[in-house]
Image (cartoon, helix red, strand yellow):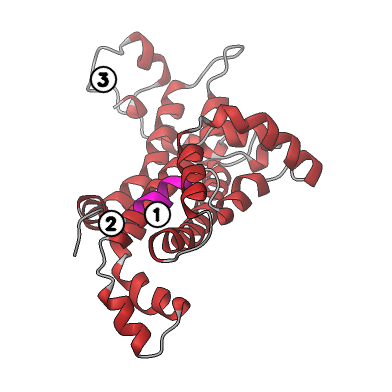
Amino acid sequence: MSSLKPSIDVMSKSYELIPSTWDFTNYYKGWVNGISNIPFSTFTWNSLYISVLATLGTIISSCLAAYAFARCKFKLRGFWFACMLISMMMPIQVVMIPQYVMFQQFGWAQSSLPLIVPAFFAASYGPFSIFLMMQFMQGIPRDLDEAATIDGCGKYSIFFRIIMPLVKPAIASAAIFAFYWKWDDFIGPLLYLNKPQNYTISMALRMMSDKDAITDWGVMFAMSTVSLIPTLIIFFCFQRYLVEGISTTGLKG
């Protein structure tokens, strides 16, 4: 409702839910003008680009790691699994400075690479996805693996032909969470993106609220509403897989 109010009414009449004057130009001004004459579509594309690639990387790396923990036997398996759990419980603030120093040495500090590349190595939000899919895979009967082995399938064939089709709900759940977290991420882009044309939606919304200038609250609320559209679309399209992936995790077949 605030996105449809004139900016002056957002704070002065914040107690009123229904706008006294309907102002639909907030969406046009926010989408076209954006920040510093950079249209809001640029920030939306940046967020989509980073979120989609990071989600893809998280799913690929997490599926492989989860399959290794759930189905394969190797040395120090318990040790590496404990390390994965520790990394899942570790606050991002603990590794923020070491990561920045490392990426600066790589020459990535002023680009979107630190926000995308680690996802392909199950970093950042990967441990949660690994744990989720691992629990789902452990619920799949091992008789399927044994039957496939008798038919001549190796570990990779079992993974791609048997395990992957059966864990689609868990993959969908992990993908939704990974996309949400990356889409809402603020501290990552704040650290590594220093050019306005590379900003994500979270940074653009923050820049719209300027304590040293007059904030157009109507436009800011309008663009905040626009930023919710991709997440709502993904949720309503894949909520069946989300519920199924979480409710059946850990159940034995």
Quadrant of image for the C terminus: bottom left
Q: Please tell me which residue is depicted at 47% across the width and 43% down the height of the picture.
A: 82
**In-front residue for pair 253/125:** 253
| First of labels 1, 3 by sequence position | 3
Q: Please tell me which residue is depicted at 47% across the width and 77% down the height of the picture.
A: 156
Whether the magenta-drawn stretch holds residue 126 is answered as yes
The picture quadrant where one finds residue 226 is top left
> Where in the figure is residue 37, as x and y percent of width and height?
64, 36
- Residue linked to disc 2: 238
- Residue linked to disc 3: 20
Q: Is residue 220 above or below residue 128?
A: above
Verify CB contact (< 8 Å) between mark 2 and mark 3: no
Whether the magenta-drawn stretch holds residue 141 is answered as no
| First of labels 2, 1 by sequence position | 1
- Residue linked to disc 1: 175
Q: Secondary structure at mark 1?
A: helix
**Magenta portion: prevailing SS class:** helix
Q: Residues within 10 Å of mark 3 (few under 14, many from 20)?
A: few
In the image, is 128 to the left or to the right of 186?
left
Quadrant of image for the N terminus: top left
Residue at mark 2 to residue at mark 1: CA–CA distance? 10 Å
In the image, is 81 to the left or to the right of 132?
right
Name the disc covering residue 64, or none.
none
Verify CB contact (< 8 Å) between mark 2 and mark 1: yes
Badge 1 amino acid: Ala
